Amino acid sequence: MPQFFSTSDADFEARFTALLNAKREDSPDVDTVVAGIIADVRERGDTAVIELTSKFDRLELTPETLAFSAEEIETACSEVPDAERTALELAAARIRAYHEKQMPEDASWTDDAGATLGWRWTAVSAAGLYVPGGLASYPSSVLMNAIPAKVAGVERLAIVVPTPDGVANPAVLLAARIAGVNEIYRIGGAQAIAALAYGTEAVRPVDKITGPGNAFVAAAKRRVFGKVGIDMIAGPSEILVIADKDNDPDWLALDLMSQAEHDESAQSLLITDDAAFGQAVASAVEKRLQTLERREIAGASWRDYGAVITVNDMNEAASLSNRIAPEHLELCVADPEALAEKCVHAGAIFLGQWTPEAIGDYIGGPNHVLPTARSARFSSGLSVMDFIKRTTMARMTPQALRAIGPSAEVLANSESLEAHGLSVTARLQQLNGSN
């Protein structure tokens, strides 16, 4: 059973703080191992990647077979059932349409001093997309990573997906094709991140790496940051459902389990203003846990990290939600839009009882790569903005330099940066001499 507590409890603050600070990730000391893997790949390139893939994925490769061939991709795509193909195509279209609206515009204007200022947006040249493999092989993650990059205008996309024992998920390869990606490598782990960041004989380096992975992948992304950009360091999945009593307890139980079934370290939380309803949802969870295919994983998550919190009102619920800063936030209340206005820290918000979080994972349109571990307090989910960068633009006319240049001289001299000031002075002297 999960924890049950109420904001009326005398020890509520202590228990809630402990809930916020609970470490849900496995914490093996992986950084030293990852550092060694990265150094090995940098030194030995393909040879290191091939040996590590053999060791961890039990797959024997050569430099020529690191990437899927066009024929292999074609064969795999043909194996995907029509219903799955149609669903992936619909999801891709919706994801593309949503992300196209995120594209920012260039800007340029002339200010009162006569200087022309502005900015322009340009895409990174190459991006590497990590897609988890094995049991957690999700074609939806391909779409969510690749489509925003394509919309942003990234010229080259490379996908890495581990294929333990050589078994690939055909739907993953089809999703890559639908998204317009043909460069797909059957490698994973820290060695794949290193190959993307530094390049090998067979893998050209990229400028940015996105996509979730295990602790080794997360540690590798952290280590290569600076050499390349990264999206975020993703942790276990999480969901917070805020609900009143006018909901079906079984629906909400399924919503909570939709994240719990991801990982034993995932977290599912319910906040309600009706204690009896909270108990009803918990009972519905226990009933569902008797039949779910992934009941052992979901049950461990619910037992170790789940919680049902009773509040006095929805204002209190919003305040707690902002402290939790959940990855996924469902608002199953009478006026979800009004409550959403008060919930300022969340990766994604799902409004009303007809909007289960699972819609966001697959078909809604917004991205499902979202900040975890309370990082929604300061970061956002994956978007086209992760694949573009802003370059500022400035053009001085002689009149503009005459107007603002003297202040630049003053500030440069105050910082004892003589050449800075002189670079302005020389031009002002030319202008003044021409009067």
Image (cartoon, helix red, strand yellow):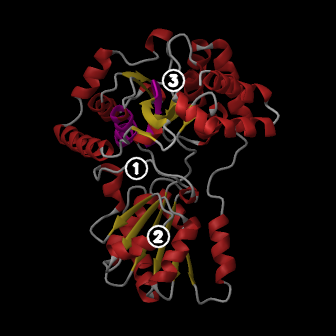
- Residue carrying label 3: 206
The residue sitting at 55% across, 23% down in the picture is 53
Q: Name the amino acid, label 3.
A: Val
Does residue 124 sit above or below 218 in this rendering?
Answer: above
Left or right? Give the position of 432 relative to 157: right
What range is drawn magenta here?
Answer: 124-151
| C-alpha gap between disc 2 and disc 3 | 36 Å
Is 130 colored magenta in this rendering?
Answer: yes
Left or right? Give the position of 257 relative to 427: left
- Label ID, residue 426: none
The quarter of the image holding the C terminus is: top right
Percent of width and height locating residue 93: 23, 41
Q: Secondary structure at mark 2?
A: loop
Q: Name the amino acid, label 1.
A: His
**36 or 95, which lies in front?**
95
Is 193 colored magenta in this rendering?
Answer: no
**193 or 401, which lies in front?**
401
Q: Quadrant of residue 55?
A: top right
Report whether residue 232 is seen: yes
- Residue carrying label 2: 343
The residue sitting at 43% across, 65% down in the picture is 329
- Residue carrying label 1: 368
| C-alpha gap between disc 2 and disc 1 | 19 Å
Report whether residue 289 is seen: no
| C-alpha gap between disc 3 and disc 1 | 23 Å
Select label 3 or label 1 by which is in front. Answer: 3
Sequence-first disc among 2 and 3: 3
Q: Secondary structure at mark 3?
A: loop
Label 2 crowding class (10 Å Cα cut-off): few <14, some 14-19, many 20+? many
Q: Name the amino acid, label 2.
A: Cys
